[in-house]
Image (cartoon, helix red, strand yellow):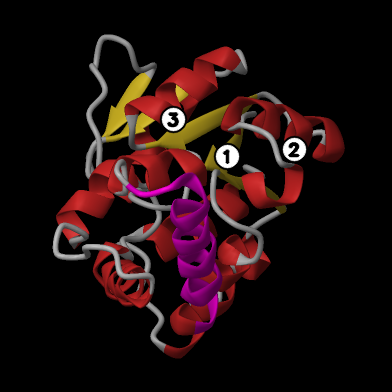
Amino acid sequence: MHSVIFDVDGTLWDITGKAAHIWQQISRKYGASADHITAERLKQEFGKPLEAIGRSLFPDLPEETMLRITSESCSEEIPFLYQNPPKVFPGVRELFAALQEKGYPVYIVSNCQKGYIEAVLDTNDLGGYVNGHLCAGDTGLGKAETMLQLIRETGAPDPVYVGDTSGDFIATKEAGLPFIFAAYGYGEVSSEDADAVIRTPLELLDVIDRV
């Protein structure tokens, strides 16, 4: 039986509207242009390492300023999310409950900052369904290496990864795992490349045993 490792942004929930508000505020604090930081733009960026997001959003800023904006925006996201929690996508709670009932261990790995996954779980009362989680903020590593560290630490059996971007796909294959593409999310992955494709969270229950 597989264990299932999930991505967060674009796979479990969408916070780009709320995140854009924070990133705009912090950018303007440092005198940077912020009009281009929209929910749609962040959908193209989320899932990348944080420094890569900063370089993409602020290519003309000095490195030090870019890193300050990126770091401070991420720090501000977590308390803001606790105060203004977005909901997970429809079907996610039911999916987690069904996976637990059927005996599939559930894990989460993301490129996010430390404390972010906890915010997702706490504000949506999902912690009881998740067997473990790890992020780049915890490990200082890329997504593939973070996946492998989680597997080593937890003993996750026969894991598959569920994500929504080409970056997720590349990292999953670097880690040597099957990849299930969440086509309802932010990115694009060829159905021929993915081991399976789901168009709603609950469709995972129909494909998990065929991967």
Tell us which disc is closer to us: 2 or 1: 2
Q: CA distance from mark 1 to mark 3?
A: 11 Å
Residue picked out by circle 2:
150
In the rendered structure, which amino acid carries the disc numbered 2? Leu
The residues bearing labels 2 and 3 have C-alpha atoms spaced at a distance of: 16 Å
Q: Main secondary structure of the magenta part?
A: helix
In front of the other: 142 or 96: 142
Q: Amino acid at mark 1?
A: Ile
In the rendered structure, does residue 65 fall within the stretch colored magenta? yes
Tell me residue 185's x, y (percent). Answer: 26, 45
CA gap, disc 2 and disc 1: 9 Å
Query: Which residue has dot 3 on it?
Result: 168
36 with respect to 25 (left or right): left
The amino acid type, in three-letter code, at marker 3 is Asp
Q: Earlier in the sequence, mark 2 or mark 1?
A: 1
- Read off the magenta span: 61-79
Question: On residue 128, which mark appears?
Answer: none
The mark found on residue 5 in the picture is: 1
The image quarter containing residue 92 is bottom left
Residue occupying the point 72% across, 27% down: 148
Q: Secondary structure at mark 3?
A: helix
Which element is circle 1 on? strand
Give the crowd class for mark 3: few <14, some 14-19, many >=20 residues within 10 Å. Answer: many
Whether residue 92 sits left or right of residue 152 in the image: it is left
Earlier sequence position, callout 2 versus callout 3: 2
- Label tally: 3
Tell me which corner region of the image, top left, top right, bottom left or bottom right, holds residue 110.
Answer: top right
Whether residue 65 is visible, yes or no, is yes
- Is the C-beta separation of discs 2 and 1 under 8 Å? yes
Q: Residue at x 22, y 65 (%)?
A: 34
